[in-house]
Amino acid sequence: MENIEFWSKTQDGKYYINNFQFKRFLEANNYFKNKPNENSSFNLIKKEGIFLKIVNEIDIKDFILDHIQENDFNENVFNLITSKLSMFKRDYLSMIKTEKINLIKDNEKSCFLYYRNGILEITKESTELKSYKDLNINVWKDQIIDRDYKECDHHDSEYRTFIWLISGGFNLTENPSAKQVEDKKQAVSRYNTFKSVIGYLLHSFNVGCENRAIILNDEMISDEPNGRSGKGLFWNALKHLKKVHSLNGKEFDHTDKFKYSGVKTDTQILVYDDVKKNFVFENLFSEITEGIGITYKGVDTIKLSIAESPKILITTNYTLKGSGGSHDARKFEVELSTFFNSKYTPINYFGHKLFDNWNDEEWARFDSYMIQCIKFYLESGLLDYDKISLPIKKLQTEINIELYNQLQGLKFNDWYNYDKLFNDYNLNVGKYGLKTKTAFTQAFNKYVKFFELEVDYCEPNGIKHVMFIKREPVIVKEKVEIWDELNKKAGV
């Protein structure tokens, strides 16, 4: 630590801050400022060799006060510093020099992970561990993985097993039925989707027109979903390789100017965890395709381009509202199976907490598996699968769950008074119902189209009635040739 006295004393014994020496002191102790881009405010940064850490005003104040106390300076100096809190305001601290930083960033073909023993470059074909000392680069300190990388076989990784289980995976019996074989194929397809999603989130490379928010949902359809399917474990695994910041989805308010005030510009994955039922996905369109703006209190906004912005992950127990091309182009949805729930958790299955109770060998298997997921994504991109219940959940969200349940209760080939259906619906749904006949009809038609129902209408005495038609299958008798019939009678 450089020891430069940044205070002076007048002839009558009064202490005061020497601004120039204070600037020299901070810079000598490797503090500087940097703008992520020309359109942004600056970050305050502390450099430790090639490693960089984003700091705030309180961090600098703590550093100064610790320095004063550790060196046993006159208590008048301590009193001076603590009485001049304005010297820890950003406007004052902006006098320190601006420096450029040289970071290695993920690109279209490569992903970088920063271990204690080197930088691992991952491509779809290979992995290569490079020494920090051989590279003229800077690295964010908070992106360093606090363990050494070592090669290891990934097949026995507990986390790999976890992904297989939340994909609905199982082992086939000795003589499997046709349904078991088909279910196994679906599980493998969803498992590959999860692998591609892991790789996508760990690959910190964004292109606006291709960027998508990953949405984790539950496979089980329920009016009162309970969660506990493993979504938290899924995203918590990511923070052991990349810098992750999570937001409380239930309390997230998109109109709050400071909604991202806890996010730093070196964040690589941003998680909206457990968002509420009426979360408006459309509010994130700008963040997904243009980048996020971070506003701290008393600070100009730091506007990150899409290339500088974190990947976005949303977890929810509900179906996000919104359909159409704009929504579909910005989200990628995956369902978790019902294997884990509130009564049967990963602790019950594995016998311990994932991550917390792992030894070095299990961490090596985990690393190897996640690297395989990155390679898989770089090779194949995001892979979709045939959703199990998500289409129905979307329909329920779009037309209102109460109307869905009402129409599910109608019997085939029975006539129903259309006005009575509308009135009964509004009596049951309360203030959130479809209040107009037009809205009710539009939702009714969506239901009919989704299930490809045949509908008939009639208007006895001018009153509209509706019926869902279910026709009996036509049994076609086998055509019998006349000569066959004659031979049969003759006993031939």
Image (tube, grey):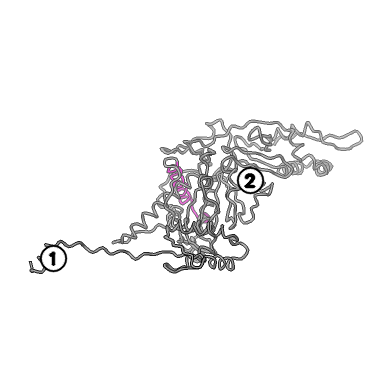
Q: Amino acid at mark 2?
A: Val
Which region of the structure is painted magenta?
355-377
Q: Which residue is mark 1?
A: 485
Question: Circle 1: is it few (<14), some (14-19), or many (20+) Cα within 10 Å?
Answer: few
Mark 2 or 1: in front is 1
Q: State the residue in front, 172 or 455.
A: 455
Our reading of the magenta stretch's main secondary structure is helix
Query: Quadrant location of the N terminus?
Result: top right
Q: Could you tell me which residue is drawn at 47 percent across and 45 percent down?
A: 199
Q: Amino acid at mark 1?
A: Glu
Residue 3 at x, y = what percent? Answer: 74, 35
Q: Could you tell me which residue is drawn at 56 percent across and 57 percent down?
A: 438
Residue 59 at x, y = what percent? Answer: 70, 43
Above or below: residue 206 compared with residue 154: above
Tag 1 secondary structure: helix
Q: Could you tell me which residue is drawn at 44 percent across and 62 percent down?
A: 456
Judged left or right of residue 398, residue 46 is right
Q: Could you tell me which residue is drawn at 46 percent across and 64 percent down?
A: 458
Residue 255 at x, y = what percent? Answer: 67, 49
> Which mark is first along the chain, 1 or 2?
2
Q: Are marks 2 and 1 in contact (CB under 8 Å)?
A: no
Query: Quadrant location of the C terminus?
Result: bottom left
Above or below: residue 221 compared with residue 86: below
Judged left or right of residue 91, residue 173 is left
- The verdict on residue 357 being magenta is yes
Q: State the residue in front, 286 or 7.
A: 286
- The verdict on residue 282 being magenta is no
Question: Circle 2: is it few (<14), some (14-19), or many (20+) Cα within 10 Å?
Answer: many
Residue 71 at x, y = what percent? Answer: 75, 41
Q: Which residue is mark 2?
A: 263
Tag 2 secondary structure: loop
